[in-house]
Every structure is written in structure tokens, then in C-alpha cells.
Image (tube, coloured by chain):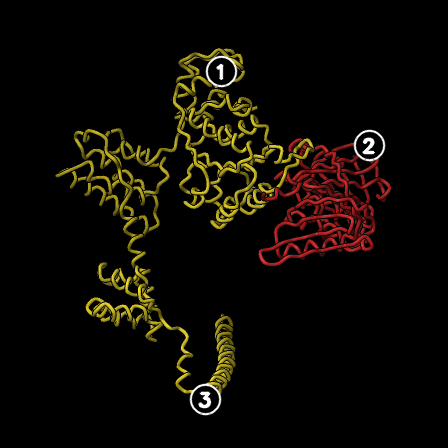
Amino acid sequence: MLWVEKYRPQTIDDVVAERQVIQKVVSWAERWKMGERQKPLLLAGPPGVGKTSLALALANTMGWEVVELNASDQRSWDVINRIVGEGAFSETISDDGELLSSRTGRLKLIILDEVDNVHKKEDAGGEGALLRIVKRRPPQPMILIANDPYSLSADLRREVEMISFRRLNKNQIAKVLERICIREGVRCDREVLKLIAENSGGDLRAAINDLQAVAEGRESVKPEDIVTGKRTQEIDIFRFLQKVFKTKIPAHGDAMLLDESPEDLIMWIEENIPLEYEGERLYRAYRLVSRADIFLGRVKRRQFYRLWKYSTYLMTTGVQNVKDEPKRGFTKYHSPSVWRKLMYARKRREMFRRILKKIGRYSHMSSRKAMEQYHYLRQILQNTDIEHAARISAFYTFSRDELEFMIDEKKAGEIAEFIQHHGLHRVEDETFLSTYTGGKKEDKERSEKEKEKDEKVDQEEKKEHVRKQKNLTLDAFFGED
Amino acid sequence: MIDVIMDGDILKSITRAMVALVSEARFHFMDDRIHSRAVDPANVAMVIFDVSRENLEAYSIDEEKTVGVDVNRIYDIAKSIKKNELVELKVEDEATLRVKFGSVEYSVSLIDPSAIRKEPKIPNLELPAKIVLDAGEFKKAIAAADRISDHVIFRSDSTGFYIEAEGDVDRIVFHMSEADLIEFNRAEARSMFSIEYLKEFIKVAGTGDMLTVHLGTNYPVRLVFDVSGGKARVEYILAPRIEAE
């Protein structure tokens, strides 16, 4: 049996975590017990720090039934939502065949493990369904668990109470290992435990697994028995940048452990070079990055991924060795601004397209044609008096944002206010014109209706016609093959 | 060694009943009957089925035995059994179940029973109201309610048995007076349930099958279906929805 399972904490007191975290979780559970519905909890943190253990121990302590959904091949959003959607709103039949009524405080804890992983594998729509369930404030407590909470949507994060777990420190881990050793009757050297703890990088589960690997079935373990290889740990980008800019220890190996492709990595490095280097060195670093970029281009063009190696080497170890002495002090690294700029540009492009569409629709022309008119329209809006400009804007139903996009902010604001103040709006219904024809109104309407009908029939016929033609061409196309 | 010959329809019904809640289950081949039960992953509903020895065409077992069955697979296979066809189930070693009907024989690997989720005890419920009706009628009511809501209220009092559903704008009441029911004890009870489950349950039965509803107030409901011409008994226990205060 795995020691990790064997020594899973049974009650909340056995859980190794920061005191604040435990306090928060316990008070959450207490409030549930008093009958107050709470937001679901989101336990976030790196692997192996006891998120799941805490949730299970909590249920155990509170005497709650557990419905646990952990990563398995059967799990998809569909299944999760069915189970969660029903389970969270119903009473419980326990494994002992007992009805647990929420009225008497017999609750059921629903644990959704690795929610962030489902998101990646399955369609994104499932998360929306979960969000809807959460928004309905289920009467049963729920705990979501994720390694990377930021891969979940912001809406979902808003609907839950997030509790972050930090990596455990060496001493905490060593203490747990020591306890296990005593229970297993293995005499373990202090040094050994320290070594294992250090190697685990704050991952208690990894540490316990390593300990089991060296200690199981033995009576004592000495430092020289430790042969477990160094664990590869996923590292985060900021630590990686620190290594690149502050040290000369070759970092190209670490680049592999990052969850970033070289194409993204180069952005990170490029963005942060000017924070660390200046003058001649800045120039040299950028030259290396540009060389790296050339390789990236070649990878793309030739689909020859082995070139990534050179590219990574240049952008990491290459950039590292430009410096003689690292810049002192802490540097706050930025995320690449390119992405932000791209997003901004896309937004502007979409806005422009929307404006053109509006001009096109109300002035009866295509969007492309509208582009020719756009600049004149802008001039008019900018230079005529407010009332005039407002009437034109209302005619095109421009929103405030769209006006701000076209002309300077001050004038746009004035126009928008004028429109709002005077209640200007576009008259969509054009039947009012019929009053000019007086008595003939009805006749006209009728004839219009008939006309419409005819047109519809016409259109339908046309459609069919078109379809037939299309079919024909397709048939011809396949026929030749 | 287990060797059972039964009406194909029975196998279809009992596997259909199980797949509504779980994908794998333990089947107990006991001296007097075949029995299985399971709780769904959300701990909201339980399914129990029994087929007694008299209703099987042939039944021979060396000793009482429990096997783990992938019910999804068996149900898939059972779907292709024709009406009135007999089916033979055979377990010779621990590892495979052979399903034979017509001219085909399927071999399906069994699952180690200890790997399947722990079986629940059958709850001891005190349910005052007992309503016996045609499963077809019940089916109609649930199908109608499904269109407007995700939960229904079962209610019974001296005037009859009610199934009520409320949507955002519309409302359905399904009422059966004592005269419409096969058996009714006029007890008062009222509970709310999720349609999502009921919808699955009713698939097991058809018009002409008898359904017994045991109902309490804010308490689980027991739905006992007599299926395959009364040869098999499928029972569902469903925990009530928590009503918003």
C-alpha cells in the first residue's frame, strides 16, 4: 500500500498546512453546520501540499459524506455536471443505507479534484455549466481543487472563495517524514530526511513516495542509501528569469521544465532584458535574442523542431553570459507586453469593423464602401456643431465607445451626452411615412403585404434555384473525380 | 460455475435498470435469486434488483457467488436480444462471463468485485403512503414534467395522488384519484425529487408494468417496478431534493 494513502491525515488536526488556511476552512465548515449556505471553496496550490487531504480530513472531522470526483478517464464536464448538479441539490443516501438529511446538519461534501485539468481536456462550455450550478448556491458544501486557479474563468473564481496553499518548507516535510518513520519502525537518519525533503521541492507527496522507495522493508536508512534521482520539478517563469538574469549557471536545461514554448519564452526574455542590462550589454543581449528568433522562424518554416535547441540555447545561456556582473537588487519582471498590444490591436480592429458595418447598414452600402466614407464622416462629426453631430451619430446608432474611437474624447463625450439628454434615437419603424398618404394608407399596407408575400415566394424560389444550381455544380465536381 | 438460462427480456430490464445509475456493479448469484444493488456516484439514488429462481428457465450454481459486471457492456449486448428469445449466462472461471443467445455468444471480461464501489446496505425507510399504479401513466407524467422543470413534487392525500411540476411560467399537475389507482392507502405525504433521475428510472418499465410508489414527507421515495411481465423486480430509492427555504 502506498504510504501516501496509508498516512493520509484522518482529522483536520493532522493536516500539515498554514494555520490561517486551516482556520479559514474550519470556519467555513462551521458556518455550513450552522445552516448558512456558503460559497464553494477553491483550494489552489502546487501539487502535493495537501489540498485533497485537507478536504477529505475536513469531511471526516465534520462527519460529512464525501462524493469525490477525481481525475479519471470517465470524467468529463458532462459527467461532473450531472453528478454535481444533482448531488448538490439533493439529500444523501449514505453507504450504510442511511438517509442523511441536511436539516439535521448531515451534509455531503462534494470534492471536485483537479478542476483545472478538466478544462484543458474537454470543451470550455462545461465550465460554464459548473458556474451556473455554483451561482444557484447549492445547499450542499462543495470544494474545488486546482493547481492553477488562473486557468479557470474569472467568473468562476468570483463565485468561489479561493484559498491558496504554499509549498511546504523543508522542516515541515521532514517532520512528517519523521512521524511516518516512527510509525513504520524504520530508523532514519536526520540527514536522510532532510535530503529527501529538500529534493522534493515542497511537494509532500513526492517526499513520502521517495521515503517509501528507500525505506520500505528496511530497519534503518543512512545517507549513503539515498539513490533516488533528483526530481524534476516544474518551475515557474519568474524564478527562471531570475536565474537567467542574476546568475551564470546555465539555464537552457531549465527552459525545458517550463510550461512555455520557446516562442513564448523569447517574449518573456525580450521584455525583461532592458530591466537588467544597459548600454553595450543590452545591445549584445538583443543581438542574441534576434539570432534565437531567426531559428524560431526556421523551425516554423521548415517544421524542423530540432532547431529549437539552438534557439533556446541562445536566448537563455547566451543572454546569461552577456553580463559580467548581475545587476544588484530585486527586479520585478513583467509579462510580455506584446500579448497585451496584440489584444488591444484586435479590439480596435473589431471596433472599426463594427463602425463600418453600422455605416454600411444605414447608408446602404457594403462595409468596404463604407471605409471610403468613413474619413469624411469622421471629419463631419469632429467639426460640426454638437447638435448636428449628435443627430448624425444617432442616425448611425454609434455608442459612446465608438464615438471615442472615431473622434477626440472630449467631443465624443459631449455628443454622447447630447444624445442622451435629448433622447435622440434612430427611428427604425418607417411606417409613419404612410400618414402622408392619408386615406390610402390601408390600401397601401395591404398591397405592401401582398408584395411582401410575393417577394417571399420569389425569394424562396430563388433560394431553391440557387440550391439546385449549387447541387449541380457539386455533383459535377464529384462526378469528374 | 454458474449457468443461468432466462428470458432475454429480463436481462435487458435488469441491466437497463443498473445503467441508469452506475456503469459497473456486483451481481450476487444466491441460492434463491439473482440480486444486485448499487448507489450512484452522487449518493442520491440507489437501485436494487431481484430475479427469483422460479422466474428463471434454468438455474444452477455450485455455490453462492458474486461477480463484478460491466453493466454498460452487458446492456449494449442485451439490446440486440429479440423478443421472447432465451439467453444463457455462464461463468466458468473467475474472469469471463459468456452471454449466449440466438446464434451468437459474447465473452465479456468480469471485473474484480473488490474493485467496485462498496455496496450500500438497503435503507430501512418508514414511508406512510403506498400508491400502486400503471407505470405507463407515471411515465407520461414524468415526461410532461420534464419539459417544464428539473424537479417534481409527489404528493398524496385523501383525494388522490398528485405529481406537480412548476416551470418559470407554466405548471403541470397530474392527478390520479383513488378510482384511477390500483391500490391506494390515502396517507398524507409530500416530497420533492429531481426529474433527471426519475427520467432514467422510468425507462426500465413500460405500459402494463406495475409500479408501487412508497412516499414520505421530505423523505426518500421507493419506486418498485415489476418488469418483464412481473418476472423481475427493480427497486429505486431516491433521496429528495433540498427545497429552497
Tag 1 residue: A179
Amino acid on which disc 2 is placed: Asp
Q: Colour of chain B?
A: red
Q: Colour of chain A?
A: yellow
**Residue at the (60%, 55%) spot, across then down:** B167
Q: Chain of mark 2?
A: B
Residue A100: x and y, percent?
65, 34
First in sequence, mark 3 or 1: give its number. 1
Amino acid on which disc 3 is placed: Lys
Tag 2 residue: B62
**Residue at the (34%, 47%) spot, across then down:** A304
* Discs 3, 2: same chain: no
> Mark 3 against mark 1, which lies toward the viewer?
3
Q: Secondary structure at mark 3?
A: helix
Residue B59 vs A431, above or below: the answer is above
**Is residue B51 left or right of A96 when viewed as pictured?**
right
Q: Secondary structure at mark 1?
A: helix
Residue A178 vs B190, above or below: the answer is above
Quadrant where the N terminus of chain B is found in the figure:
top right
Q: Quadrant of residue B166?
A: bottom right
* Discs 3, 1: same chain: yes
Q: Chain of mark 3?
A: A
Tag 3 residue: A440
> Mark 1 against mark 2, which lies toward the viewer?
1
Amino acid on which disc 1 is placed: Arg
**Residue at the (74%, 53%) spot, across then down:** B138
